[in-house]
Each structure stands twice: as C-alpha cells, then as structure tokens.
Amino acid sequence: MKCHQKKGKEVVACTISQYKTSFCSQPTFHILYCPSVLVSMGCHMFFQNPLFYPGLSDQRSPTHKLSSQFAFPNKLLKELDPELRKDVIDLLVPFNSLHIHSTVGKGHFSEVFKGYISYSSTKCQTVAIKMLKPERAQKIVEIEQFLQEAALMKNFNHPNVLCIFGISISESGIPMMILPFVDMRDLRTFVADAARELLVIHLLNFGNQVAQGMAYLASNGYVHRDLAARNCLVSSNFTIKVGDFGLAVNLYKADKELKSTRNFPVKWMAIESLRDHRIYNEKTDVWSFGILLWELMTRGALPYAEISNCRLKAALEAHVRLGPPEQCPKDIYHLMLICWRQQPRERPTFFELCSEMKTLLEAHSGKYFGRFNSDPYYQKVMPTQKFLKCYTSNGR
C-alpha cells in the first residue's frame, strides 16, 4: 500500500506571538535568542527558540469516524461495563484498517508499536498503536482498566496533552489504542542522553510545557496520579506531551471506588497520598510535578535514590526533601520546594506555576547577547551521576 502524507506547515519563529488555551487567557510568548549559541548544538529548530510552543498539527484526527461505517459484533464489547461501553463505542476503528509495524516500546501492561491507519487504498496516517499484552487481555478487569484510559483521553484537546485517535479490538479480543506517533520517546530518556547539549532554559521550557498540559487537565477536573518524566513524550519538534493516563481519574466522576492493578509511583507521590492512597487532587499532582522538574534539572537522576520506598514516608514526615541539582538556579529550585510543601493548601496551583515559569523564561529570553556567557539559564547541564544529598527544613 502506498501512502501519501501531507507535510505539516513549517514553524516560523517570531519575536512575540500569542496563544490562548481554554484554561488560561494569558498569552504564551515565543522569544528567540541569538543564533550564535547554535554553533555547538547542531541545527535543531528547538535550539533557536527556547520558548518554542508548537501548534496543534497532531491533535485529534477524525480517525474514529471510520467506525460509523462498520458494525462491531465483538463478544468483548458485550462483556464490558455498560457505561464504559457507551464511552468507547464512538472511538472504535475497524481492526483491518490498522497496519502494525515495528515495536517502539514495552511496558508491564502493554506494548507500543509504530503503524499506520488507512483511510483508503491511497491515504494513510502514521500512528502509535498501544496494545494490551495478550496475557493481560485474559482478564476483563484489566481490559476495562485499559479502555477506561482511552475513554478518559477522548476528552483531551491540548497541545501538551496526548490525545487519542481511536481504539480497536483484534479478532482475538485484544484491545488497542490508536495514538499520535511521537517519534522521540519519553522525556526522561530524552534528557538523560548525554549526547544532547541542553541548557537550563531548555529544561525549564520542557517543564513549562508539562505545567501547561497539567493546568489544562486540572481545569477540567482530571488528576493524573502518575506524573513523571517517563510518562511525558517528546516529539521531533520538541513539543512535550503529558501521557500515560492509566492511573488518571476525573474528579467529577470519582464517586465509584477506584480500582487498579497498577503499582503506585512511590518516589513521585505526595506525602498525603503515601499516608492514604485514596487522596488525590491537583495538589498531589503538583507535588509530582516538583519531582519531574528535579528530574529535568538533573537530566534523569532517580529521586531519593538513597532512600527505600518503605522508608520514604518517614523521611518526608521529617521534612527531608531532594537537594538542589547542580547548575540549577535558585529560582527553579524554589519552584520545586514550594511544590513539596507539607501542607497541600500551601502549594501552588498549576496555573500559578505556569505564571512563575513564564516570568522566568521571559526574564531570561536572551534579549542581550552579552548575557549568554554569564546568565546561569544559558549554562549547559550535564546528566548527574553522583548522589545528591537531600535537603531538610529541620537542618538534619
């Protein structure tokens, strides 16, 4: 089958432009810095624009509308919870329209493949196909958890949140999600690659994009519950997308008891969630964002590497916190610390974090060439290999 794919619009960097989201009326600024910095960095478009905020070229596609032309007499659909079946039925795509190619990732519950979805004999689209592992697809409870993630994602529409194109079910009853193909893998792997020359301002920009996506989710009542660099994706145009919603919930529909066979990400969890796993809200996600920001500034270090999972709650109760990463400006470390405040009400919202990071990015936009040699935001950051001491407000 021959595919004819249209090339996306070229991104034109500008001095200042505005982009408004549904949750925030504040403009996002695209500010350039001097091209001479690019000498040792190659020709990546991103490095020409530390505040690059890509458009919506890979947002929701009308892929799922294919399902209206087909019937799905699938036994699996009949076994699903009626409410869940109602939520996903409009996402169904005929399995024979999918063409699965190479594996791009494996997890405990699913595998991700690069593939194509065909609209006709001459038109197709590259997609990622996330398939529940066959051994997991033997239990209806695991299938329902997988499809609940799809049902949640169908409501998302933001450039920094991974959307879903549709779902499909194989002839053997294995469910799969059809997602945008993001070709640069997860954010942790990306920043941990020592071959990439990244500046502080680049890493802050990544964090800002994650916060933008999380502000959108929070404004619509969603709690991620597993926010970490490994669960964010980086596209070839350096857009960051929050993904992996296997533990996510909608607070407006959280009247049912939450059921999940997934393990909880202890090192990223807020202290109140370690006390009681039933506690989850925007402020618990904000705590996790602080850990993610620390991951970025260390370029992929493991948080609390010297503290075991079973000892972490006691350490946090004693006010132990992750120490400042090397080459991390005080302003950025301050953002981490306020995310880890003991009392949830004292932590910022994602909207407030976006505002703080926007201010920092604007203040260090590279307006003056002479700044590059002295501004800590334009210093190269290397992956941290050594132990980082923890900080405690009690001086221990």
Image: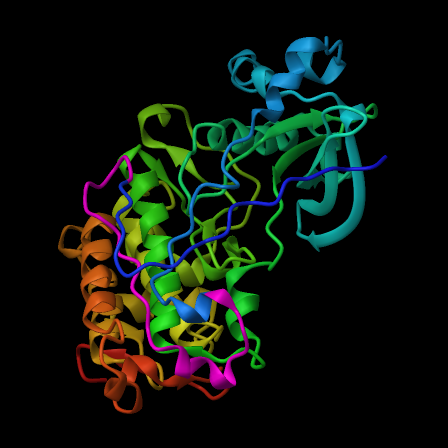
Q: Residue at x 55, y 34 (%)?
A: 164
Residue 391 or residue 29, whichever sits in front: 29
Q: Residue at x 59, y 50 (%)?
A: 182
In the displayed structure image, the side of residue 273 where residue 70 appears, left or right:
right
In the displayed structure image, the side of residue 265 where residue 18 appears, left or right:
left
Q: Residue at x 50, y 47 (%)?
A: 243
Q: Which image quadrant is residue 138 in? A: top right
What segment carries the magenta color? Answer: 21-45
Residue 146 or residue 335, whichever sits in front: 335
- Colouring scheme applied when the structure was drawn: rainbow
Q: Which image quadrant is residue 365 in? A: bottom left
Can residue 37 be found in the magenta stretch?
yes
Q: In this view, does 146 lie above or below 293?
A: above
Q: Residue at x 27, y 35 (%)?
A: 22
Residue furthest right in the image: 1
In the displayed structure image, the side of residue 118 where residue 156 appears, left or right:
left
Q: Is residue 10 visible?
A: yes
The N terminus appears in which quarter of the rendering?
Answer: top right
Decide whether the magenta segment is chiefly helix, strand or loop: loop
Q: Can residue 328 be seen in this view?
A: no
Q: At which x and y percent is residue 351?
A: 21, 48
Q: At which x and y percent is residue 103?
A: 76, 51
The number of numbered discs placed on residues in the rendered structure image is 0
Residue furthest left in the image: 346
The C terminus appears in which quarter of the rendering?
Answer: bottom left
Q: At which x and y percent is residue 111?
A: 71, 47
Can residue 32 be found in the magenta stretch?
yes
Q: In this view, does 68 lie above or below 227?
A: above
Q: Is residue 126 above or below residue 93?
A: below
Q: At which x and y percent is residue 91?
A: 59, 21
